[in-house]
Amino acid sequence: SCHIRIDAGVVPGYNVSPFYDPILSKVISYSARSRGHAIRGLGSALDQYLLKGVQHNVPFVRDVLRNRDFVKGYTPTSFIGEHYPDGFSGGRLSKKETAEFAVIAREIGRKRGLLMKGPPLALANARGNYSHDGDEEEEEEVVVCMGGIFGDIYRVSSKTHDDGSVTANVTKMPKNSGSLDAGSEPEEAEEESHAIALSSMDYEPADNFAKVVISGEIRALQVHGEDETGMLKLTMYGSDEDVLVMSPGEYQLACHMNEPKPKDLGNFVMSPMPGTLISYGVQEGDIVEMGQELCVVEAMKMQNVIRSHKAGAKVGKLHGVVGASLRADEVLIEFEQMESA
């Protein structure tokens, strides 16, 4: 078996400092069988290692453990630069794993609805309803929005069997599709359908974890809760997702909603990581050039020079205070809006 050891670096009431290495704990795996067995054991342990209230690197470590080069032992000093040239933006799942994630999310939502006696999905007929009448063999069809209502859309047609197992067919749909009527075929589906077999699921609404057997594999997902809109916050393999389960009818109406435009952050310089603001290299009113040093942020005993991504821009405001602790993405500098030519 794989042995797991946790060396805790904090105790209740301890303040995690941004200075030096803000280590919370070390999770260590050991297996006399093989490196691969130890890696799988560590991955399983991290899937069941719940941290709340602080930023942490568990999703990144979990993603690294699934990297083929890491599994093979190819880990040069350039590993992160080669595999994460644009930084880490979340755990990456295969197409089938995403389909499995959609089915598990649907079943977590269904079980929460049943046990908490929640209302049926809006505008749902029998195919998408939370069944309270015990008719488990009837096929149910829902729309699962991975990443929220404006995220990736999956049609999940599932059937619950007498032994509690679930078989489902999952198809990724075009966004804002008008072809999600129950029983209709997808128009110009972006990806192939996946047949998913969920053998069992151990989950109660008060639990932080859902333990499932899916595609013959034991898996643990973290369940962070559900907001007032019904959005579930889940984590699988280090991939954090906001998941919304809707009836086909509700989704058809949702297609008429306009997606909010993202805020333009081009005039802001933000801290790339938690740390301490050491100094500014500019003052309010300065005109900066491309690549010019703007400020220095210290993190994990290293000083990181933040440089300008603009040429000819005027510094409007310095937001940070030298010597202050910083959060990741905290605004440091704001440029004045440049007039259009």
Image (cartoon, rainbow, N blue to C red):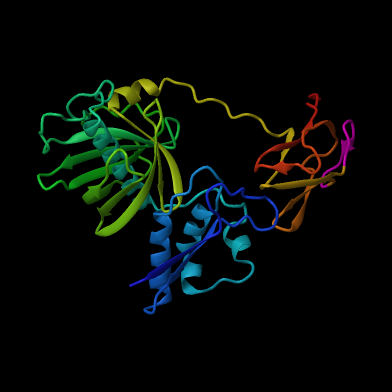
Quadrant in the picture for the N terminus? bottom left
Q: Is residue 271 left or right of residue 208?
A: right
- Viewer-proximal residue among 104 and 170: 104
Q: Is residue 254 above or below residue 46?
A: above
Q: Is residue 305 left or right of residue 158?
A: right
Q: Is residue 292 above or below residue 117?
A: below
Q: Quadrant of residue 162?
A: top left
Residue under the point 39% across and 25% down: 229
Q: Quadrant of residue 142?
A: top left
Q: Is residue 9 above or below residue 149?
A: below
Q: Position of residue 87 (x, y in %)?
A: 61, 52
Q: Magenta region: which residues?
A: 282-291
Residue at the far bottom in the pictured view: 32
Q: Is residue 185 visible?
A: no
Q: Position of residue 254 (x, y in %)?
A: 39, 23
- Viewer-proximal residue among 234 and 214: 234
Q: Position of residue 285 (x, y in %)?
A: 89, 30
> What is the magenta segment's predominant secondary structure?
loop
Q: Is residue 143 visible?
A: yes
Number of marks: 0
Q: Position of residue 278 (x, y in %)?
A: 81, 47
Residue under the point 46% across and 70% down: 71
Residue 303 within the segment the image draws in magenta: no
Residue under the point 66% across and 50% down: 17
Quadrant in the picture for the C terminus? top right
Q: Is residue 147 left or right of residue 60?
A: left
- Viewer-proximal residue among 53 and 253: 53
Residue 289 within the segment the image draws in magenta: yes
